[in-house]
Image (cartoon, rainbow, N blue to C red):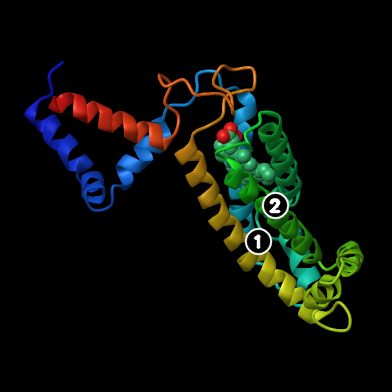
Amino acid sequence: MAKSARQAQIEKAALYPLEWVEERTGLVGGMKFFLFRNVPGDINWMQTLGAATLTAFLVQAVTGVVLAMYYKPDPNSAYESIQYISNDVTLGWLVRGMHKWGASLFIILMFLHMARTFLFGAYKYPRELNWIVGVLLLVTGMAEGFTGYLLPWDQTAYWATVVGININATAPIAGPFIAQFLQGGAQIGPDTLAKFYSLHMLVIPGGIMAMIGLHMFLVIRLGVTSPPWSKTAAGRPRDEAQPTGYRDYREGLIREHEGEES
Ligand code: HEM
């Protein structure tokens, strides 16, 4: 059915902000490419584990922001503030529960995703750097779990952190320095709690977000690997008819453009 002049006018007005942004940044086209890019036809559910890990991280970020609105990083009030969140704040028990259980889920999903990329050979050329970024994400993800564990400031939190810091102290050469840095004094106390809080809600999440950005950029640029049983699996020559990454997409556009000109 043909659009009336009025409909066309409304459509134009609605799309104007998008066009404004696109003209100045190219972000709309970039997002379109990200959402509608070609992936190999034989990818399967195991390849959604990375997106599941990303979702778990986003849930941690959102619930963590809410918890930070009520939590007090001070030895005299940390434990009480956690009790207050669980018992008195509206739906506080739910947000805290999601953050606490979500932390384990995030780590488990990261391991499953890593196992998938390993078994599919997705760490091979040209994705070695993405594997390295992944390993850094795994280490920082676990550091996030370790620093968060102290924050409830109860007996379990305290003694688990004593054990964790002592394990760090046994590392060769750097061990005692790492332990001293983490502890921030002769024993675990107010300075340790403040330091862990800062690491847990600023430093480490900031690093993780930056690395996820790089990780996703490389996934988009290089395309997704096919399963090992596929003809286009990692290490085998790619099927030219099946573009995957941004480079293929750009080359395709150039070819199309050249075709139009001749
Ligand atoms: C915060 C943690 C992480 C997030 C949010 C994340 C996210 C993703 C996403 C969405 C993808 C594309 C879809 C997929 O293949 O599932 C991907 C691919 C990839 N990830 Fe991760 N990842 C994380 C951690 C890791 C870890 C721990 C490793 C390995 C040590 C890793 C290595 C890779 C590799 C090699 C690819 C390319 C896979 C391919 O081309 O088939 N990632 N990641």
Instruction: Residue under label 2, please give it.
Output: 99
Visible residue check, residue 65:
no
**Residue 25 vertical position relative to residue 34 in the rendered view, above or below:** below
Q: Residue at x 53, y 31 (%)?
A: 224
Name the residue type under label 2. His
Quarter of the image where ligand 1 sits: top right
Instruction: Residue under label 1, please give it.
Output: 67
**Residue 30 vertical position relative to residue 8 in the rendered view, above or below:** below
**Residue 155 vertical position relative to residue 124 in the rendered view, above or below:** below
Measuring from the top left, give residue 201's x and y in whole percent: 64, 65
Q: Residue at x 31, y 40 (%)?
A: 29
Disc 1 from disc 2: Cα separation? 9 Å
How packed mark 2 is, by other alpha carbons closer than 10 Å (few <14, some 14-19, many 20 or more), is many
Q: Residue at x 21, y 30 (%)?
A: 257
Mark 1 touches mark 2? (CB < 8 Å): yes
Report whether 109 appears left or right of 11.
right
Does label 1 or label 2 sit earlier along the sequence?
A: 1
The one of 190 and 37 positioned closer to us in this rendering: 37
